[in-house]
Amino acid sequence: MAGIGFVLRKLSRQDNLIGTVQAYVISALISTGPWLFTILALGSISALSGRFVSRSVLVEFRTIIIYNFAFSLVLAAPIYMVVTRYLADGIFRQDVSNTPGTLVGSLVLLYAIEVPIACLFYIFYANLSTELVLAAIINFLLISGVWLISVFLTALKNYRTVTQAFGLGMLATVLGAGILSRLYGAAGIITSFSLGLSIILGLIFARILSEYPHPITNPFAFMRYFIKYWEIGLSGFIYNVAIWSDKWIMWFAPEADQPASRLITFSNYDSAMFLAYLTVVPSMAMFILSVETNFYEHYVKFYRDIQQLATYKQIHENWKTLVRSILSSSRGFLVLQGSICVMVILTSSKIFDFLGINFLQLGIFRFGVLGTMFQVFSLFILIILSYFDHRKATLLVQSVFLITNVGFTLISLKLGFKFYGYGYFLASLVTFIFSAFITMNYVDKLIYHTFITRNASVTE
Amino acid sequence: MTSDQQKINVCLLLEGTYPYVAGGVSGWVHELIREQSHLTFHITAILPPDASQDYRYELPDNVVGINNIILHRLQRGENMKSRAQHQLFQQIETPLLNLQARARTKDLKKIMALLQDAGGRVGSQVLLDSEEVWVMMIRMYNTTMGNNSFLDYFWSWRALMGGLYSMLLADIPEADCYHALCTGFAGLLLARTRLETAKPCLLTEHGIYTNERRIEIGSADWLEDPRSQNLNVERNRFEKNLRDLWIESFAGYSKLCYEACDRIFTLYEGNKDLQLEDGADPEKLFVIPNGIDFERYSSIQRSESHPPTIALIGRVVPIKDIKTYIRAVAILQRSVDNLRALIMGPTDEDPDYFEECIEMVDHSQLNDVIQFTGKVKIDEYLGEIDVIVLTSLSEAQPLVILEAGAAGIPSVATEVGACREIIEGRSDETPVMGAGGLVCSLSSPGEVAHALQKLLTDPQFYQSCSGNIKERVRKYYNKTDQHKAYRDVYAQYTG
């Protein structure tokens, strides 16, 4: 019999309407996790070792750690973002047998890129003693390893193991630093930090292998995801370059430090900014809670009802509820973070007085507090966007942040000390407005986008 | 069309068949083209998106061109200003809804005109994926089946619209006349061609498209939606469920195609009723039966010395209802000594069903009576066969009855397709020739056994059936007549 007529069966009910986004969002969160970790590590080690070693040793240590954190994040981000997506898809397909293989493969890839770069930089550019070079390189590789390996547990939502490992590692670091700093100076502190990182790495590694008792297969299968999900890799890279770009630019300020090691920093700027970041901790906590409970529930209902053959009326109703939950949460953050921001700015001189911080940093700190508020709002928006699998917009928002942060920081550098930090604040504000605009536009047409532009069976 | 290309006499509009799929209709088309070697043919093949594009036939030399239209696959096309899109979808909505309810040619005309106004480069970007068409789709959903699953509607809507637009936006070659081999999407393409070119349009339907889709859709369980069992009696004229949507759309395409055609051919009388039901003009309806090589089969020598032999010639698949045949044999062998019953056809198409048949033969202890021959050349067997049996649940115009009939072998067949016409003669047969076998109800082993018994044990009746069927085949089912009929039709319309 002639006639096709009805070959449409397979077109009718497809499973891929819901993307695999749940785990992807975690990687957005760990983009801030490392930040807080960096700040806390620097702060606590400095505070403790400060009792035993001279100020110059401490500065040497801090400088190397800042370099290691900054560049390890930038280099590891594209890999860990793509690996996160690869793992998430595996979990969605209920096939996680490749997990140990991927862990090994991605570590090999990461080190293949980082070892030459770290060696070139520390051996040929930096002017450091041999033991510091060695300690710095090892520390750099360990930090990068921690970023990458955390993905394997966060993608599986295993927060507890991560927290325990980090806690134990940091405890070892602090204890080690107390002893080694007295014997070996900066190299001793770095090495004790490396010791702590090794413990973190070892614990998480063991945890992964025990949770996934599979042989190591297809270690480089995730590589094709660099082509398929290039936006994700690029996003991770741009995001980390963007959040560091104002610091890097400010390192070239006339007031910056020019040590003999040739590792320039601007400790007044860096410290003020790091301190400012701490003000977003309450909002971050509230956000995670709110996403996991309120938003996620409506989000899942929206997609599940579509799959379970809801009428358009029901879908529209669910969409309205979802939008309402986003708006009400946003209001909550605005109020919470806004109040914190105002309070901190008003009392900043008292805080500085209390903590004994250099008052030169006060202006930078105030801009920093405003800037981090808007940056964390943008981050929330980015996470919402990644829930809706809007990869292009995510990339766009991060690019805007990079461009404005570079541009405005350069201008504020030109304008002089009074304006330091203003560039970062302005960049965060512009990025926030831009991302809010994009997201409102997108969420406004969410049903359309879900069926047409986000639907792999339509767009393929 | 480039200038060095040959002029096309007949453009065949084929859906999911020749030359990419082997089968009855494909074989028919292949032979048609070869027999009309004085004409040039172009093939426009409509294919599903994932179909194989390997030729299963060697194209005859008089095929001067072939183009494929992939169903649902549209060019992305150019974008349009959103105002223009808004207007387009305001205006196209009603004719689209009509097409899904009670299609009229003027609806198709309106849709074509709107696409024309939109500028030739419109494609999936605007017609399927734009925000403006989304709004229209929601409106159409609310009008037709707002209480049904939106996800299902969405996919059905996309598939229907994708099918429609891929027919309306495809290139059609210039030809003297256009000949479709089924309605459905090919029929829609024919209707469009008629409106665009005003050239003669012909249709030959082997099976009736809407009827086959009705059966298919009726048994498609994924269309089942509890919500569609709407108890509300006051349904508006467009309101329907997913099944209705599909069936009414196909029925609409058939109607448009019938309206576009100058002549509509089918294989046997029975099909005409279904075509009339779908809105075909009775003036346009003609029957051109398939013919067989009468000379070849009538010259087969029939042996005198063989056990009483009956044969079912066909694939061992459920639709042939082999089990009823086996049951009939079980009854028949009680009254006919030394009976031999053949099942001649490939057994590998549905291995599970074949296995069940074997078990049934074992269970009925018919191993000495029933023989599965597999796929064989029937010429070699016909000489030793006394009666042909056809227990099929569905047939169009089964050639085996004709081929055996030419050799003077009567048949016992179920009342499906053209079987009664062939065995008992058409209602307008003059002079009336008489029965060439017996017709039975579906799945009635007793009736089949009884008919067979009569033929095998009543030599006088057997002889009259044998003579009648041979004469009827010679007169009405000769292949040369079939080819001549199409030669005449083409002569009239290719001018």
Image (cartoon, coloured by chain):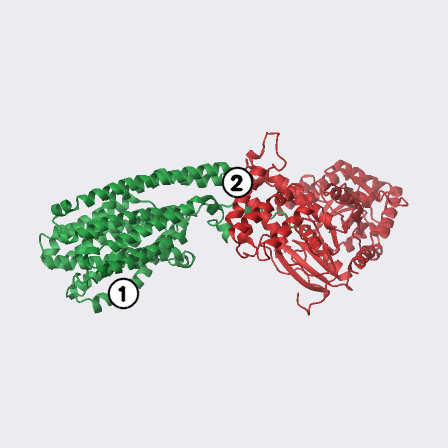
The residue nearer to you, when weighing A96 against A442, is A442
Quadrant containing the C terminus of chain B in the rendered view: bottom right
Instruction: Report crowding for label 2: few under 14, some 14 to 19, many 20 or more residues within 10 A (C-alpha).
Output: many
Q: Which chain carries label 2?
A: B
Q: The green chain is which one?
A: A
Q: What residue do we see at 67% from left, 39% from top? A: B363
Label 1 sits on residue:
A117
The image shows residue B477 at horizontal and vertical percentages of 82, 51
Label 2 sits on residue:
B150
Q: Can residue B102 be seen in this view?
A: yes
Q: Can residue A101 be seen in this view?
A: no
Total marks placed: 2
The image shows residue A226 at horizontal and vertical percentages of 39, 58
The residue nearer to you, when weighing B455 against B474, is B474
Q: The red chain is which one?
A: B
Label 2 to label 1, Cα distance in Å?
54 Å
The image shows residue A129 at horizontal and vertical percentages of 15, 66
